[in-house]
Amino acid sequence: MHERSSVGDLTEQLRRELDRYSPGGKLPSSRALVERFRVSPVTVSRALARLAAEGLVVTRPGAGAYRAGPRTAVPPAGDTSWQEVSLSADAAAEVVPRTVDASGVLASLAAPPPGVVEFNGGYLHPSLQPERAMGAALARAGRRPGAWSRPPMEGLPELREWFARGIGGAVGAAEVLVTAGGQSALTTALRALAPPGAPVLVESPTYPGMLAIARAAGLRPVPVPVDPDGVRPDLLADAFRATGARVFVCQPLFQNPTGAVLAAGRRGEVLSIARDAGAFVVEDDFVRRLVHADAGPLPRPLAAEDPDGVVVHVGSLTKATSPSFRVSALAARGPVLERLRAIQVVDTFFVPRPLQEAALELVGSSAWPRHLRTVSTELTARRDAMTAALRARLPELALPHVPSGGYHLWVRLPDGTDESALVGAALRAGVAVAPGRPYFSAESPAPHLRLSFAAVAGTEQIAEGVRRLRTACEEVRI
């Protein structure tokens, strides 16, 4: 076989021969396949990886490859014809200036001065990042045949399949686009779904980066309050009726900043409300892989329960790896997929192939599940340490919800507290914190802080940071 086509040819040959093996049956060893088909070990590895991504085989490091069990039937496709009406109903709306306010984003991206405890960070501390595994994955990816050639515009098929499987089988690989990080995916989604000047419904409070995207696109964010069980469906329905919005952006799992999980009884109601409004739900599933050790089974993505193309799903590897490992995915059904694809191609062409190849190497390695288990344990310990320290040293700060996933706590300050004054005092005391005001698209009902426990070195630094925050609170007389 020629090297250029050998991976595809070998994959197809092995796919045809799978019926020779019963479910759980072991395939020939990689060495035997190399000798039989006269291909390189890399070609064998990639062919088996493709079959594993399709759910046809299971690979076990050190043991070999085995035929997978029967595949779960894919639900029948729903009716996406309603999207033609929704996508073409761009009614004239009041023009909104496309201003860009990055202050809320910079609060979690800017590195604090040396010696300052980083309670404002939005990513894992370097000690929690899988640096060795990412380095090894990138090295292996660089040696793959064609690793530096142009990838398919939509992304590598194996990586699209991996993201699709993570959604739960309701979305196929053909309905997935690989994107350069969650922020890029959200930008593409909002540009595709709403014209300038249109309202877009958002959770309140919500991620400042999403508010910045919306405003930069000339959209009008309209807040819908969140309680401990996620967005309130009654207020969501009211907001759709009052505004005529065609888009709702939400984070159903470990919402940023509250940490809330959309309750089981509300999930179907939210989808039904959006469907009746002829609207899309943009699901930002940003920290599914940062679940804590005591969380229990996680609810499936909303996209897994949506056959009719209501949900545009965003999933990412960045939060669980490194801020520089910017690989994510957009998933959608129906005509909207082509609009998303067109905007992505115009904006970025494609995600660099070496990074996609490295992502495949990383998530297919034995180091990946070990890393996720380690992060889960570490985040649980850090969350508990910060919660205990706040309750002991700063009982006047209310902590209404302790999340079972994610990387931060949402703290309510006493009424009348000057957030800006406290943030400044905290920095002078040697701890950087994120003010709550940028998380609200309208008036804030109360002062808050968002405190990250993932960006610090460990539990000892958390205790020191809370001690410094106590000093700041005393300075502003809380």
Image: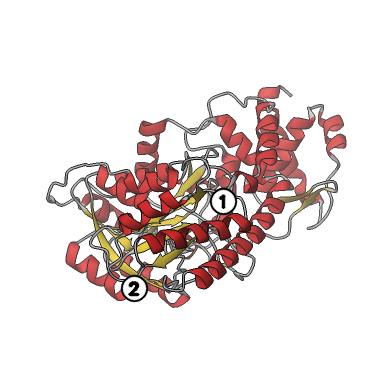
Asked if residue 415 shows in the view, the reply is yes
- Please indicate whether residue 448 sits to the left or right of residue 74 in the image: left
- Which residue shows up at 70% across the image and 23% down it? 3
What is the quadrant of residue 45 in the picture? top right
Judged from the image, the secondary structure of the residue bearing numbered disc 1 is loop
Judged from the image, the secondary structure of the residue bearing numbered disc 2 is loop
Q: Name which residue type carries label 1.
A: Val
What is the quadrant of residue 183 in the picture? top left
Q: Name which residue type carries label 2.
A: Arg
What is the residue that sits farthest to the bottom in this orientation?
A: 265
Q: Residues within 10 Å of mark 1 (few under 14, many from 20)?
A: many
Residue denoted by label 2: 232
Q: Is residue 456 above or below residue 442?
A: above
Q: Residues within 10 Å of mark 2 (few under 14, many from 20)?
A: some
- Number of numbered discs on residues: 2
Q: Is residue 175 above or below residue 47?
A: below
Q: Is residue 478 above or below residue 104?
A: below
Residue denoted by label 1: 456
Q: Position of residue 41 (x, y in %)?
A: 79, 31
Q: Position of residue 98 (x, y in %)?
A: 21, 42
What is the residue that sits farthest to the top in this orientation?
A: 2
- Please indicate whether residue 148 sits to the left or right of residue 78 in the image: right
Closer to us: mark 1 or mark 2?
1
Image mark for residue 187: none
Question: How far is mark 1 from mark 2, CA to CA?
Answer: 33 Å
